[in-house]
Image (cartoon, rainbow, N blue to C red):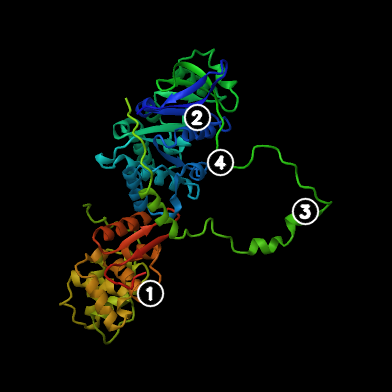
């Protein structure tokens, strides 16, 4: 089946201007225009006109397109309510069930938005071959997800998002994915992403460099490029095999839904008696400043998750549009301050007591195990304690027991926790024991800083890799939401929380 939708009217002749969906699926689309030029209005018109004819997947950083759900049945995925693995699993289900969805990223910080969108797009791209159905993938504010320059973005996140956007625009066609990217400035968008589009809709822009690049893409000379500066809101110059073989000026048509942004019109200011407005601003101001600030967003309830999955699973069938085992993380502790062995010798006690003294010393967990073992042997010799039966491997386990607090647990629980930790490498033992103890006692799980101390590293990324490794070993289950919440459960202990 082929289909053609109308996006607006020619600026001069009034003739209807349309887009051939089958051709669009094969050739992709780039939309450019300054803020306020009508990009979101154009994207909304396009989505509304082809709703029901082809699957639509919208990457929405501002939450503007969630209103499509009310009129057209799109499933809204609130990214902040899901962990990275859940986002990837949802993307696979979206492809499997051909559901039209809006990935709402507006409740996340910018870097989390970028990472979430990259994981989602990569999972769409990596879906099994039997799920390669045709779909329009609309990415608004694409300069965020495919930046031309690094800026302040984390290098790992930038590589991830550039790879995802490049795959979408360069290799997505064979997988049924047709990228539609919208950006405020072509100069901000990675060239590898922009160059793969064969259809263009160029809105108003004022900078000479942007006008020249837009004119080059439209096949216009420098004098004709001035037209781009004079375009009105909602007017675009279009060109491409899915639109027209010659540049056309399009007045974008009306839409049936609206975004959630503030109104653009003028609103009369409120009237107030003299001094009343100042009183409204300053009344009980000190109390308001001293009150605890509310969280940026409340913790999302679990119910919508099932609703989203159910909606994806029961998405309506769309007509066909035919387009023309890692190694364990390395432990690299930060250089710690030297630890002074306890000065006061004890006339009695066993090796466990000496290990406990070393464990309680400040910075002990950041010292190499060999150096701690030497101090252990010296102290035992000074105190006349037999320690020949304690080799380095046993010392490391005793040290892990001491710093994790296992020796303060009652005997029955201690035996169960030790059994659950059997077979684990000594490097990973202390943080894992702390997790087991928290799960068994019902206390909160140790935070990232505490896990780093037990692991002997001040690097948050190493702690995250530690948790990933423990999860791959089947020792724990980590659920980390993009909103920032992390939950750790331990399959070996049913009472874990």
- Above or below, comparing residue 415 to residue 461 in the picture: below
Q: Residue at x 48, y 36 (%)?
A: 141
Q: Position of residue 396 (x, y in %)?
A: 23, 70
User: CB of mark 4 within 8 Å of CB of mark 3?
Assistant: no
| Label 4 vs label 3, nearer the camera | 4
In this image, 331 relative to 60: left or right?
left
Say if residue 161 shows up in the picture.
Answer: yes
- Above or below, comparing residue 432 to residue 3 in the picture: below
Q: Give the CA distance from mark 3 to mark 1.
A: 51 Å
Of residue 97 and residue 85, the one placed in the foreground of this image is: 97
- Mark 1, Cα crowd under 10 Å, few <14 / some 14-19 / many 20+, is few
Marks 4 and 3, the one that precedes in the sequence? 4
Q: Residue at x 30, y 57 (%)?
A: 468
Marks 2 and 3, the one that precedes in the sequence? 2
Q: Which residue is mark 2?
A: 185
Q: Residue at x 53, y 13 (%)?
A: 224
Q: Which residue is mark 1?
A: 442
Residue 401: assigned label: none
Q: Residue furthest left?
A: 389
User: CB of mark 3 within 8 Å of CB of mark 1?
Assistant: no
Q: Give the CA distance from mark 4 to mark 2.
A: 22 Å
């Amino acid at each position: 089946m082929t289909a053609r939708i109308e996006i607006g009217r020619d600026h001069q002749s009034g003739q209807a201007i349309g887009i051939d969906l089958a051709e669009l699926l094969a050739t992709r689309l780039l939309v450019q225009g300054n803020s306020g030029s009508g990009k979101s209005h154009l994207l909304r018109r396009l989505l509304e006109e082809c709703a029901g004819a082809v699957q639509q997947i919208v990457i929405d950083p501002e939450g503007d397109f969630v209103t499509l759900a009310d009129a057209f049945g799109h499933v809204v995925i609130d990214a902040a309510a899901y962990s990275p693995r859940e986002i990837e699993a949802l993307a696979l289900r979206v492809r499997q069930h051909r559901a039209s969805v809006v990935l709402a990223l507006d409740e996340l910080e910018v870097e989390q938005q970028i990472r979430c969108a990259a994981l989602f797009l990569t999972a769409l791209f990596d879906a099994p071959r039997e799920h390669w159905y045709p779909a329009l993938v609309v990415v608004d504010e694409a300069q965020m997800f495919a930046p031309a320059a690094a800026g302040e973005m984390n290098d790992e996140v930038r590589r991830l998002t550039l790879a995802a956007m490049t795959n979408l625009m360069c290799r997505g066609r064979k997988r049924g994915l047709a990228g539609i990217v919208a950006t405020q400035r072509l100069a901000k968008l990675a060239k590898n992403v922009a160059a793969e589009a064969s259809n263009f809709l160029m809105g108003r822009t004022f900078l000479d460099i942007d006008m020249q690049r837009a004119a080059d893409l439209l096949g216009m000379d420098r004098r004709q490029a001035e037209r781009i500066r004079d375009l009105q809101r909602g007017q675009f110059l279009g060109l491409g095999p899915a639109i027209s073989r010659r540049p056309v000026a399009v007045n974008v048509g009306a839409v049936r839904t609206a975004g959630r942004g503030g109104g653009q019109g003028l609103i009369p200011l409120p009237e107030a008696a003299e001094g009343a407005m100042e009183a409204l601003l300053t009344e009980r101001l000190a109390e308001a400043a001293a009150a605890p600030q509310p969280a940026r967003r409340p913790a999302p309830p679990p119910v919508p998750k099932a609703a989203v999955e159910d909606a994806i699973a029961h998405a309506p069938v769309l007509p066909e549009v035919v387009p023309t085992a890692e190694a364990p993380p390395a432990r690299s502790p930060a250089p710690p301050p030297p630890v002074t062995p306890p000065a006061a010798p004890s006339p009695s006690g066993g090796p466990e007591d000496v290990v406990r003294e070393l464990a309680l010393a400040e910075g002990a967990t950041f010292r190499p195990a060999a150096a701690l073992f030497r101090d252990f042997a010296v102290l035992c010799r000074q105190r006349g304690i037999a320690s020949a039966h304690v080799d380095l491997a046993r010392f490391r386990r005793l040290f892990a027991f001491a710093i994790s607090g296992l020796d303060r647990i009652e005997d029955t629980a201690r035996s169960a926790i030790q059994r659950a930790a059997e077979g684990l490498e000594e490097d990973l033992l202390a943080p894992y024991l702390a997790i087991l103890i928290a799960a068994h006692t019902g206390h909160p799980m140790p935070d990232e800083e505490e896990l780093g101390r037990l692991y002997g590293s001040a690097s948050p990324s190493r702690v995250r890799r530690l948790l990933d490794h423990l999860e791959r070993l089947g020792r724990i289950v980590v659920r980390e939401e993009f909103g920032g919440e992390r939950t750790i459960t331990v399959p070996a202990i049913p009472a874990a929380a």
